[in-house]
Amino acid sequence: MFLCCMKTVKDAYEVFKAGLMPVYGANEAKALTTLVLTDLTGLSRASLTAFTDTELNVVQSERLLTWLAELKSGKPVQYVLRHTEFYGLPFEVNPSVLIPRPETEELVAWILQTVPKNNNCTILDIGSGSGCIPVVLKSQIINSKIFSIDISPKALSVAANNARLNKVEVTFVEADALNLTAPEIINQTYDVIVSNPPYVTHTDKLQMHRNVTDFEPHNALFVPDESPLIFYDSIARFAAGHLVKGGYLFFEINESYGAETVALLAKNGFQNIELRQDMAGKDRMIKAVWL
């Protein structure tokens, strides 16, 4: 019944916002409506306000109805629109991959502060997901050779699409971070290994919003309560045998296990271990050196 009521930008804005308010509240409903309409029309936020009489065609109105239903179900807006931005670059996303987070942008920025942009280095990213980490690193460290692994073929397909979208070359390999046997990965040494592995415990899950737990891929999120550092232990042991002397290991981590992750790295022989907080003041990332 909304279709006939969304003939102009102004109509659509009011109807869409009203439909979202019972689920998201006034402020978030307003922000989501603006985001959706800028994506649909190609108008800037300022233009949405200035040109409220801009007419929508039937296809646009029908698309809005579909998006409204999806957002009311709790589906993240990035999955609804099927794209997002990370470190200033466009990325396709769908429920096969995690939605890139600002905290991961901070991790990438740290790597780029550490590794010179003209470096002829070899980098391994463990846990491709959308490909946001390896794609950005390759776009910035142009002379680098970058490998990225994921256990999910669907995730690798998304990551490869994003490499093509951003016109960079990354070698993607299907492999298990807990049992790395792929010859093209184990027969290399690396200057940098980076990973944002699964680290959310099932206890943590109880505190999470359902737009994460109901829609984002569980195999990329969760670890057992009894072994929350299972991926960090496996990757650290692999890195100890495959980093060059002076090579770096970077992790995004669970804020509740900062000290434990530092201790794990020290036990595996890493030195100059630095635990860093994110902009929210939470223990979120680690850099360690293999000497």
Image (cartoon, rainbow, N blue to C red):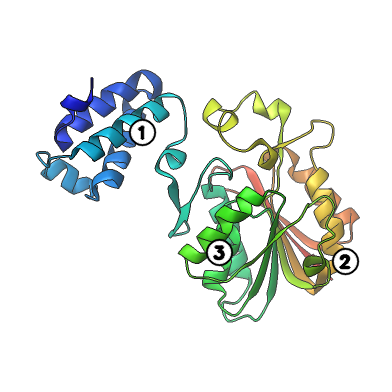
**Which circle's residue, 3 or 2, is located before the other in the chain?**
3
User: Closer to the observer: label 3 or label 2?
Assistant: 3
Q: Is residue 90 left or right of residue 258?
A: left
- In the image, what residue type sits under mark 2? Gly
| Vertical order, 167 against 110 (above or below) | below
Which is more toward the observer, 81 or 240?
81
Measured as percent of width and height from the top left, residue 27 is found at 33, 29
| Vertical order, 196 against 17 (above or below) | below
Tag 2: Cα neighbours inside 10 Å, few (<14), some, or many (≥20)?
few
Question: Looking at the rendered structure, which numbered label has been put on residue 67?
Answer: 1
Badge 3 vs badge 2, beta-carbon distance below 8 Å: no
- In the image, what residue type sits under mark 3? Val
Residue at 9% x, 39% y: name it: 53
> Which image quadrant for residue 51?
top left
Question: Looking at the rendered structure, which numbered label has been put on residue 135?
Answer: 3
**Alpha-carbon span between mark 1 and mark 2:** 48 Å
Residue at 76% x, 55% y: name it: 175
Measured as percent of width and height from the top left, residue 16 is found at 27, 28
User: Closer to the observer: label 3 or label 1?
Assistant: 1
**Which circle's residue, 1 or 2, is located before the other in the chain?**
1
Measured as percent of width and height from the top left, residue 181 is found at 85, 60
**Which circle's residue, 3 or 1, is located before the other in the chain?**
1
Which is more toward the observer, 180 or 289?
180
